[in-house]
Amino acid sequence: MLESLSERLSQALRHISGRGQISRAELDETLRRVRVALLEADVHFLVAKEFTDGLRQRLAEARVEDSLTPAQTVIKAVHASLVDLLGGPPVSIPGAGPAPRRILLLGLQGAGKTSLAQKLALMLKEQGLRPLLAAADLTRPAAVEQLARLGEAVGVPVVVVPGAKEPLVVLREARARAVRGGFDPLIVDSAGRTDVDESLLDELGEVARALEPTLSLLVADAMTGQSAVDVAKAFSSRLHLDGVVLTKMDGDARGGAALSMRAASGLPVALLAGGEGPAQLERFHPDRLASRILGMGDVLSLIERAERVASQEEAQRTAQSLRKGTLTFDDLLTQIRAMRKMGSMEELLAMIPGLGKLKGGVPTPDERQIRQLEAVILSMTAEERARPELLNGARKRRIARGAGVEVALVNRLSRQLEDMQRLARWGRKPHLPAPLAAMRQPPAGGRPRKRP
């Protein structure tokens, strides 16, 4: 989602890059371009004006450091201003209070509350907590069944009250079960509507009074742009909210909601949710997001994602295979699945310093190609995955038919694994390619012949 905003800001700052000096007129033009870039990215016009006014004041007070050029000083000031715009005290999740702590998820239909409940439960479970989900959205058809399936997928129990007509019945049963089973926190998925109306706010107000939540989070669809800010204002006018979760951050919207939310609504952003994968949820760090917007990368978030999706045992097993030069298709399948859980390739590239601005020109595999590679490996037998050397022409043709791809793709994947094995062996000790190594062997029955 942030690609559009990042590209516009990069274009606004590009004309001053490398300048040894920046005149007053050039600085005014840069500020004008930054403001236009924010407006084009769907940032609220009052927020854009406040941002550029604050940036102008910051630059007026800034001193060019010896290690920085004037252009770098401007970029540093833009980064600091973005952090101020996005920042604020972090939201404590799951909040403070006696167990079981209660997290209430609020929002409109389609914002992603139910899938967020799963993501949040998984995140807290990985932190050593014992979350419990409550299906209190009795308005949307199949919402209860959806949450039950999502909870089962991540190993988190879900409280479902068959035949319940009122959410208060579900809340009573959920709180009682949380106390009996020692679950903490309790995450409640509430009802929504397609638009904010009085009946929805009245119902949610009754739910909040009965639940007495430790933490109330508004789930907002970041792809709706300024509408997300308007929804936050409407909810906060009637309900107590502790923070906002922006969902669908992997979409193709212009990203203005991420910048406008705190300044326009006064609510801090607590979490960012990406795609459909249950692991694609991260805590909101203003400095990291500002760096990502300016194409400076976000290595810390990348490391945190990798740690969440790959178990320590899998990482050690793959590292051991690398050291031995005995990588198998099972190792490759583990890495492919871990990368898919981390997010799209473009999103991951944006987190690597220096590659964020290059990703548009770097050929990266799309989701379809990655699924094809996974299908090829799954079409192999367990023995073939563990012993890649078994693959011959007949086996490769059978695998290609099973995966619904051309044999050329199977050959390419097999060659890539061989290359990885070869590089791993060369990295372990000095090693010559086979033809060159053969030339170094002494002839049979004697010493190596000298060159004439």
Image (spheres, rainbow, N blue to C red):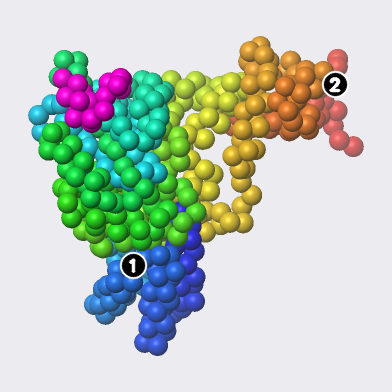
Expressed as whole percent of the image width and height from the top left, the position of residue 313 reads: 43, 20
Identify the residue at horizontal 63%, vertical 38% (top origin): 368
Q: Visible in this render: residue 422?
A: no
Q: Residues within 10 Å of mark 1 (few under 14, many from 20)?
A: many
Boundaries of the magenta span: 157-176
- Please give the residue where the numbered disc 2 appears in the rendered image: 443
Q: Residues within 10 Å of mark 2 (few under 14, many from 20)?
A: few
Q: Nearer the viewer, residue 408 or 320?
A: 408
Report whether 266 appears left or right of 41.
left
Q: Is disc 2 placed on a helix, strand or loop?
A: loop
* Residue 177, image quadrant: top left
- Please give the residue where the numbered disc 1 appears in the rendered image: 44
Query: Looking at the figure, which quarter contains the C terminus?
Result: top right
Seen in the picture, residue 191 relative to 264 is either above or below; the reply is: above
Q: Visible in this render: residue 448?
A: yes
* Residue 96, image quadrant: top left
Precedes in sequence: disc 2 or disc 1: 1
Identify the residue at horizontal 26%, vertical 28% (top origin): 165
Q: Amino acid at mark 2?
A: Pro
Expressed as whole percent of the image width and height from the top left, the position of residue 335 reads: 54, 29
Q: Amino acid at mark 1?
A: His
